[in-house]
Image: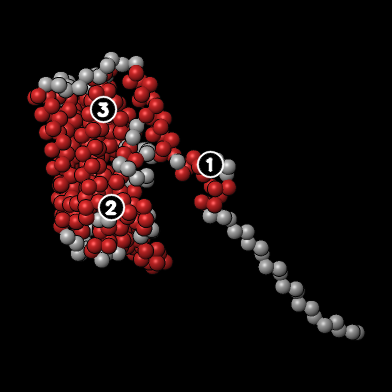
Amino acid sequence: MTLEPSREPAPAAPEERIERPPAAARLRAVPGLAVVARHLGVIVSVAAVAGFVVWALGQDTPKFPSDPADIALVGGAVLVYAFATAVRGWRWHRIMRHNGIPHSRTDAYMLCVVGYACNNVLPARGGELLRIYLMGQRSGARKREVLGTVLAERVLDAVSLALLLVILSVGRVAGSSPGDSRTLAAVGALVVVSSVFVIAMLLHRGERLQRVMGLLRPIMAASRRLVSPYGAILLVVTMGIWALEGTIFWMIGRSLGIAITPWEGLFVLVLSGFFTLIPAAPGYVGTFEAGVLVGLSRLGVSGGTAVAFALLVRFVMYVPITVVGLGFLIARYGGLQLLRSRRWEQPA
């Protein structure tokens, strides 16, 4: 009997792995979709502005303040907004100081104004990237750390808006109620923010995710430190900032002869604040006005009066700060040459 040599089975051919292209590449591969995604904010703003203009043309001719007392109210609203912006600068200064970022108090105040001004002229909230870059250059801190302080500001703003909407709804301001869709959306936003903090803390303890958290830690550190008495104080300050800006809406309403209370002015502000979360062109063009008009409609204000209100609020809250902020940028931080260089757009 002949024994045949044993034959080992041939090794299986390695399984061919088909790597999927990145999501961004797949998006670019769809004709026209990448263009829409890139310019979504502009498209939304154009549609909103077109709708506003068409609607406004069908209303009474808007009448703007002409009496000296009413004009003084508009001027006072500008001063209130300047003070509210200064408080925002103080808040950013305190957040950076609490997180050990060496900086000049003057830079904190001035760059806050520069950031808000450039948000009104640069796409995709480019003003935030610009002030992160400039503060990193002047303080020597890593851009991720500065980004984390700006993120903490946005967390405080989002939580404050949600809380204020809940408070106003419980008070049934402008006919709102705790069970309406806006209040439920605000509560949902609070739940989401709280969940993000809890998940971040759990991920921080997972050994397998230490590398990911190592990248995110400088960015998330400032926000995680808000869960403390210090964060509670900043939350109260932030709600005070929004209350100040709500006073602006009340003053504009009084200058136009609208019987509006400070609480109702705050309601319109908070509602317009949620509308600015919609992707839009620089300065939230169109979406901000849409939020103002929706809020005014709840107060029974319409027609040319509503048009005048929206345009005056737009002027008070966007024009002076843009002029002053661009002046700061030119006088202290490199001016238009810096904007053209695009260095501030580099990732953190």
Instruction: Return the residue at label 2.
Output: 335
Q: Amino acid at mark 2?
A: Gly
Residues packed near mark 1 inside 10 Å, few (<14), some (14 to 19) or many (20 plus): few
Residue beneath the point at 17% across and 25% down: 253
Q: Secondary structure at mark 3?
A: helix
Label 1 – label 3 distance at C-alpha:
33 Å
Instruction: Return the residue at label 3.
Output: 310
Instruction: Return the residue at label 1.
Output: 33
Q: Are marks 2 and 1 in contact (CB under 8 Å)?
A: no
Q: Secondary structure at mark 2?
A: helix
Q: Quadrant of the N terminus?
A: bottom right
Label 2 – label 1 distance at C-alpha:
35 Å
Q: Amino acid at mark 3?
A: Ala
Q: Position of residue 72 (x, y in %)?
A: 10, 29
Q: Which circle, 2 or 1, is nearer the viewer? A: 2
Q: Secondary structure at mark 1?
A: helix
Q: Quadrant of the C terminus?
A: bottom left
